[in-house]
Image (cartoon, rainbow, N blue to C red):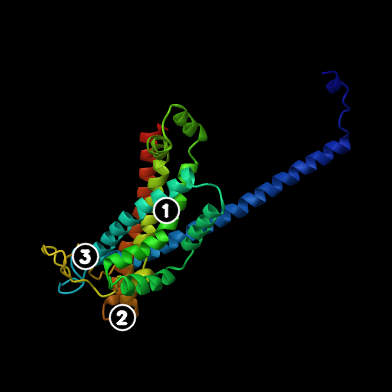
């Protein structure tokens, strides 16, 4: 208190300098805030413009009765029923393969892997694989899965090719979710006598599940809209499906994983590269359906993340 009382008062010049400094900092803050706001506004405006343009061009045909329920040929209204089914079926097979592998890899890296050059090399390889262009993955899939493995142009070849660049994304997402769980929860579970595996299953995974599910749904949106890797592996010819077929090895059975498939994104590429009368309207209608599905994936990710966070973490 004595030191504060004896402290010299600021001179008028110092007070003016301080006021000028405060005014300058406030001005810089307003300028920076304005620039950042303008950038974010421009990005949002650009995204909104793209969405509105696609919906305006293809919304009419997408809402046409029969467009979602008719096949691409043989009906009065050419539809995308087979392509829509192939897209979701391809996504399901891809997730069934990639999610367990990614979950196991992330748990190993976070909880079991030693901190050495091998682990560092594995992390680098995962990051490198996630940055590979999908066309390169498709060419590798065409050479290895289609030719060497003998699977041919098929759903399983496309699903495994998609798994190649979906696994790195999921591994990093799940790994980050597990690392975000407070260390105190691990220590408390281990102190109670639980094994490391029991701690992972009963403590870490429930706590990290909201972030894990969100990452899986978002990655599903990327897989759903992929085209380049599938052109070389699952094919681009329109499917001819028989939903009444009970022969699971038939090329027309919708659940035969060894049959060719044409997803929505590949169908757009095919119609654009080989235009026919009336194909432009179908392209925009298909693009609208694809866009809506991807947007729904993102909305679903947020809703599921918040729901699981409330149920599993009581937040």
Q: Which residue is mark 1?
A: 170
Work out whether residue 299 or residue 65 is closer to the camera in this orientation and state it: 299
How far across and how far down the image is residue 196, in percent?
43, 37
Q: Is residue 55 visible?
A: no
* Callout 1 secondary element: helix
Query: Mark 1 packing: few (<14 Cα in 10 Å), some, or many (20+)?
Result: many
How far across and how far down the image is residue 161, in percent?
36, 65
Work out whether residue 99 or residue 273 is closer to the camera in this orientation and state it: 99
Work out whether residue 21 or residue 192 is closer to the camera in this orientation and state it: 192
How far across and how far down the image is residue 210, in percent?
40, 42
How far across and how far down the image is residue 247, in percent?
12, 65
**Labels 2 & 3 near each other (Cβ < 8 A):** no
Rounded to the nearest angstrom, the CA distance separating label 1 from label 3 is 29 Å
Nearer-N-terminus badge (1/3) = 3
**Residue drawn where x is 85% and y is 22% of the image:** 3
Nearer-N-terminus badge (2/3) = 3
Q: Is residue 276 left or right of residue 3?
A: left
Question: In the displayed structure, would residue 297 be above or below residue 26?
Answer: below
Q: Which residue is mark 3?
A: 81
Frontmost of labels 1 and 3 is 1
Work out whether residue 82 or residue 155 is closer to the camera in this orientation and state it: 155
Residue 271's quadrant in the figure? bottom left
Which of the numbered marks, if any, corresponds to residue 275? 2
Quadrant assignment for the N terminus: top right
* Callout 3 secondary element: helix
Quadrant assignment for the C terminus: top left
**Residue drawn where x is 44% and y is 49% of the image:** 106
Which of the numbered marks, if any, corresponds to residue 279? none
Question: In the displayed structure, would residue 121 be above or below residue 266?
Answer: above
């Amino acid at each position: 208190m004595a030191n504060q009382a004896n402290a010299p008062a600021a001179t008028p010049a110092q007070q003016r300098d301080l006021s000028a400094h405060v005014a300058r900092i406030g001005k810089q803050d307003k300028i920076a805030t304005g620039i950042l706001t303008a950038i974010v506004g421009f990005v949002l405006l650009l995204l909104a413009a793209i969405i509105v343009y696609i919906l305006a061009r293809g919304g009419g045909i997408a809402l046409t009765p029969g467009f979602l329920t008719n096949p691409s040929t043989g009906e009065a209204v050419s539809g995308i029923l087979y392509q829509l089914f192939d897209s979701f079926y391809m996504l399901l097979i891809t997730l069934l393969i990639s999610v367990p592998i990614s979950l196991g890899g992330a748990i190993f890296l976070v909880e079991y892997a030693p901190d050495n050059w091998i682990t560092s090399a594995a992390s680098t390889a995962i990051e490198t694989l996630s940055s590979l262009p999908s066309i390169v993955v498709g060419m590798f899939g065409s050479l290895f899965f289609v030719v060497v493995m003998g699977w041919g142009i098929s759903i399983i070849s496309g699903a495994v090719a998609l798994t190649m660049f979906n696994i790195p994304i999921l591994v990093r997402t799940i790994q980050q979710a597990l690392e975000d769980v407070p260390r105190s929860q691990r220590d408390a579970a281990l102190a109670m006598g639980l094994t490391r595996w029991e701690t992972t299953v009963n403590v870490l995974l429930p706590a990290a599940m909201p972030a894990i599910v969100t990452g899986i749904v978002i990655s599903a949106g990327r897989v759903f809209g992929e085209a380049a890797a599938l052109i070389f592996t699952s094919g681009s010819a329109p499917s001819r499906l028989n939903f009444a077929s009970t022969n699971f090895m038939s090329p027309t059975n919708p659940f035969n994983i060894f049959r060719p498939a044409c997803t929505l994104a590949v169908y757009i590429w095919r119609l654009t590269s080989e235009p026919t009368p009336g194909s432009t309207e179908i392209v925009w209608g298909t693009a609208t359906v694809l866009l809506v599905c991807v947007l729904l994936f993102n909305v679903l990710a947020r809703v599921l993340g918040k729901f699981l966070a409330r149920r599993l973490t009581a937040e």
